[in-house]
């Protein structure tokens, strides 16, 4: 990530979604911003928490900057996601890129015992929607007495449950909650619902900037890497090496440097790094790529997000990515 293009500083609040080892969170913290590092991996978060404490003790961060870690699995992973997945799996499959559908079929088909996801979803919804709402009863009881699951301010329990609703809302138009449900009111107050399958919320908790660790959910960067490299095979080798360097480099180093080193290490010209940087403006959303695929007989996407419109136009957003494995 190029922090010259993603300026943050004292007074900013930054949410690092899927922080992993904390590389981006650490740099944001060094810049003096308040950062919340979020990840489902407890081991990663322990390391991140230890490093932010050490940075503070070594006075590597400006006075007044704060860092916190939230994450884990618990009730949301073992109950909410288990009840949610069957009733949106067909919609989710329809929104997976055509190139990724075989992987989805193999992995999710093995779990569900079928690759007819539309029929499975339809059958699951007969009783599954009511079952999903019943699973939310612990949250419902808490929210009748307080604003957030964590109390007067949101914390991990709120972030984890909101994340479940967020990906489901992006993937599916299925109405998960009744309007008079206390969880429905909490969702509106906790985070701005995405626009694509419903009206925008009001009275939201907001951040000044977001580091979003799901680049491939919104932008088609693979196509550009492959095109600059000259072939999908060279693009994959180049990108894999880039990811290896990224997760092993420790302190922040400029994105362009890592890209050039990765090209050199796999036997490609270092100049490809400059080529990728020059053409970065050609990145398009996956929705635009899907429209191109439509014209060629590919898959259809019912939503049309753009990286620089709506919500994104009002905040600083940085995307990072990881390999699917």
Image (spheres, rainbow, N blue to C red):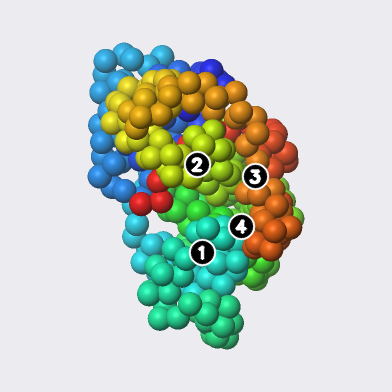
Looking at the image, residue 23 lies above or below residue 236 = above
Which secondary structure, mark 4?
helix
Q: Which of the two discs, 4 and 2, labels the residue nearer the N terminus?
A: 4
Which secondary structure, mark 1?
helix
Which secondary structure, mark 2?
loop
Q: Which of the two discs, 1 and 3, labels the residue nearer the N terminus?
A: 1
Please state the horizontal and vertical placement of residue 161, each as a whole percent of the image: 48, 57
User: Marks 4 and 2: CB-CB under 8 Å?
Assistant: no
User: Marks 1 and 3: CB-CB under 8 Å?
Assistant: no
Q: Which of the two discs, 4 and 3, labels the residue nearer the N terminus?
A: 4
Mark 4 to mark 1 CA distance (whole Å):
18 Å
Q: Which of the two discs, 1 and 2, labels the residue nearer the N terminus?
A: 1
Instruction: Kindly indicate the quadrant of the structure image that contains residue 237.
Output: top left
Depth check: give the residue in front, 85 or 118.
118
Q: Is residue 299 left or right of residue 3?
A: right
Please state the horizontal and vertical placement of residue 209, each as a whole percent of the image: 56, 31
Task: Point out the frontmost of discs 1 and 3.
Answer: 1
Which residue has dot 3 on it?
Answer: 285
Q: Which of the two discs, 4 and 1, labels the residue nearer the N terminus?
A: 1
Which residue has dot 4 on it?
Answer: 170
Q: Residue at x 40, y 46 (%)?
A: 323
Task: Point out the frontmost of discs 2 and 3.
Answer: 2
- Give the crowd class for mark 2: few <14, some 14-19, many >=20 residues within 10 Å: few
Please state the horizontal and vertical placement of residue 290, each as a whole percent of the image: 66, 54
User: Marks 4 and 1: CB-CB under 8 Å?
Assistant: no
Instruction: Give residue 101's mark.
Output: 1
């Amino acid at each position: 990530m190029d922090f010259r293009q993603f300026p943050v500083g004292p007074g900013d609040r930054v949410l690092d979604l899927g922080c992993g080892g904390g590389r981006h969170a650490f740099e944001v913290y060094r810049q003096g911003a308040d950062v919340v590092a979020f990840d489902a991996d407890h081991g990663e978060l322990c390391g991140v928490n230890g490093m932010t404490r050490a940075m503070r003790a070594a006075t590597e961060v400006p006075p007044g900057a704060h860092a916190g870690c939230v994450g884990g699995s618990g009730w949301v992973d073992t109950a909410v996601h288990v009840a949610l997945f069957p009733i949106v799996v067909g919609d989710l499959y329809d929104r997976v890129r055509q190139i990724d559908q075989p992987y989805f079929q193999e992995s999710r088909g093995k779990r569900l015992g079928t690759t007819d996801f539309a029929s499975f979803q339809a059958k699951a919804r007969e009783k599954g929607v009511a079952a999903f709402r019943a699973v939310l009863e612990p949250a419902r009881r808490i929210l009748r007495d307080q604003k957030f699951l964590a109390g007067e301010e949101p914390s991990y329990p709120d972030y984890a449950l909101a994340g479940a609703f967020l990906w489901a809302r992006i993937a599916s138009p299925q109405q998960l909650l009744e309007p008079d449900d206390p969880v429905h009111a909490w969702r509106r107050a906790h985070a701005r619902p995405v626009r694509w399958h419903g009206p925008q919320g009001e009275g939201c908790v907001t951040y000044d900037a977001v580091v979003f660790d799901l680049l491939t959910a919104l932008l088609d960067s693979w196509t550009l890497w492959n095109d600059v490299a000259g072939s999908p095979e060279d693009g994959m080798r180049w990108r894999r090496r880039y990811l290896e360097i990224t997760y092993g480099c420790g302190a922040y180093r400029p994105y362009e440097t890592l890209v050039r080193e990765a090209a050199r290490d796999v036997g490609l010209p270092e100049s490809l790094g400059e080529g990728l940087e020059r053409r970065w403006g050609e990145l398009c959303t996956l929705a635009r790529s899907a429209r191109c695929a439509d014209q060629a007989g590919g898959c259809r996407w019912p939503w049309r997000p753009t990286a620089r419109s709506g919500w994104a136009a009002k905040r600083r957003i940085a995307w990072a990515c990881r390999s699917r494995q």
